[in-house]
Image (cartoon, rainbow, N blue to C red):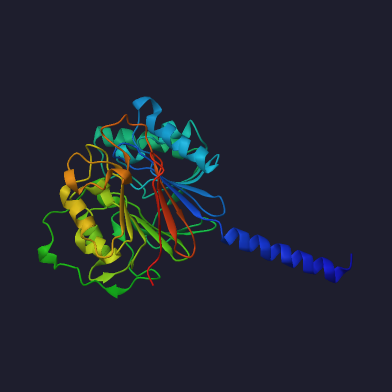
Amino acid sequence: MKRGCALWIFLVLTVSCVLAASLKPLRIYFIDVEGGQSTLLVSPSGQSMLVDTGWPDHNNRDAQRIQAAARDAGIKQIDDLIITHFHEDHVGGAPQLAALIPIRNFVDHGSTVETDPHGEALYNAYLKVRSKGHHILARPGMEIPIAGMKVEILSAAGNVIGQPVLGGGEHNPYCPTESQLRPGVDTSENAQSVGLLITLGKFRMIDLGDLTWRKEYALVCPINRVGRVELYLTTHHGLNISGESYIVDALHPIVAIGNNGANKGGTPEAFTVIHNSPGLEGFWELHDSLAAGKLNAPAAYIANLNTQEDRGHWIKVTAYPNGNFTVTNSRNGKSETYHPRP
C-alpha cells in the first residue's frame, strides 16, 4: 500500500472515531437512596463520577442500588467519588459501597465541621475508605478532570466562586435584598456542600448538594455567576431552607428532578418554587412526597410510589452535546425528550 493512501485511511479512521465519540451521550442515573443522595454520571468517554453514596446500613441497600446502576451503565469502577458534605445520607454509604466496587479518586471539601460523636464517627469511617484511594480537595473554581464532559466546582467549604463561569455573569432580577433574606446562619455541614456544574456541549446540569439559603444567595446575587441550566437537581432534597426562588428562577431550568424521599424533603414551599419556575417544562421525582400532596409530579413521572413496594427505581437522563436530553422513569418506562432553548 502506498504511503499516501495509508495516511489517508488513517486520517479517515481518526476523524470517524472522533465523530463517533462526539455522538455518545452523557448518562445520568438518579438513584433512589430514600431521601439521601446518590447520582451516577458516565461521560461519553466512559469515565464515571458518583455524587454521594446514600445512607449506611439497611443491609447494604443503598450500596447495592448504586452497584445495580453501575452494572446497567456497564462500568466496573467509580473513577471519581464526590462527597458533597459529611452528613449520614450523603457519605454514610461510602464504606459499604467501597466493599462492592473499586473507587479511584475521592473529592470532598476537607474536614467535617460537625465534631459531635456522631459526626466524627461518620467522618472517620469515610477517612478509612478515602485513604485507599487518591484524595482531591475541592475548591470553588477548580475543574475535576473527566474526559468527555466539564465538571466545575461552584461551592465548597462554605465558599462560592468569585467570578462567573462561562454562561454566567448577568444581573439577577429575582434577588431580594440582604435584609429580606431569612434570618440566621447555617453553621452545619450543609453550608459546606460541594456544588457542581456539569456541562456537555449545550447541556448543563447543576447539583448543589445540601447548600443552604445564604450560600445560594452568595452564588447568584446580585450577579448570577452560574447562568441558566437545562437540568436542576433539587437542592437539599427539596427542603424549605434551600432552593429559594431567587436561585431556581435565575437558573431557569427546563427540567427539575426531585431527589426527595417519601418522608424527607419534598416540602410544599420548595415544590411551589419549582412549579412556579419560569420556563419549566418537566418535573420528575424519585419518590412521591407525603408532605407535598398535590404538588407532587403526576404519578407517571415518579419513580417510586408510596402505594407500591419500594424497589429503588431510578430516573435516568441521557444527554447529548446539542442540548437534547431524554428523561426516563425506570419503574414504568415513561420517557420524554427535551430540547435546549434558542
Q: Quadrant of residue 91?
A: top left
Residue 113 at x, y percent in the picture: 27, 45
Q: Is residue 292 visible?
A: no
Using the image as rendered, state which of residue 40 and residue 128 is in the foreground. 40
Q: 56 or 33: nearer the eye?
A: 33
Tell me if residue 264 comes above or below residue 16 in the rendering. Answer: above
Location of residue 275 with respect to 305 vertically, above or below: below
- Asked if residue 45 lies left or right of residue 135, the reply is right
Question: Which residue is found at the position 27% from the left and 53% from the top?
Answer: 211
Q: Residue at x 10, y 65 (%)?
A: 179
Q: Residue furthest top?
A: 59
Q: Quadrant of the N terminus?
A: bottom right
Residue 250's x, y, as percent? Answer: 26, 66
Residue 327 showing in the rendered view: yes
**Number of numbered markers:** 0
Residue in the picture at 48% in, 65% down: 322
**Is 137 on the left-hand or right-hand side of 234?**
right
**Residue 127, percent across and down?**
41, 38
Relative to 62, residue 324 above or below: below
- Front one among 263 and 298: 298
Looking at the rendered image, the quarter that the C terminus falls into is: bottom left
Q: Quadrant of residue 114?
A: top left
Query: Residue 309: x and y, percent?
Result: 32, 29
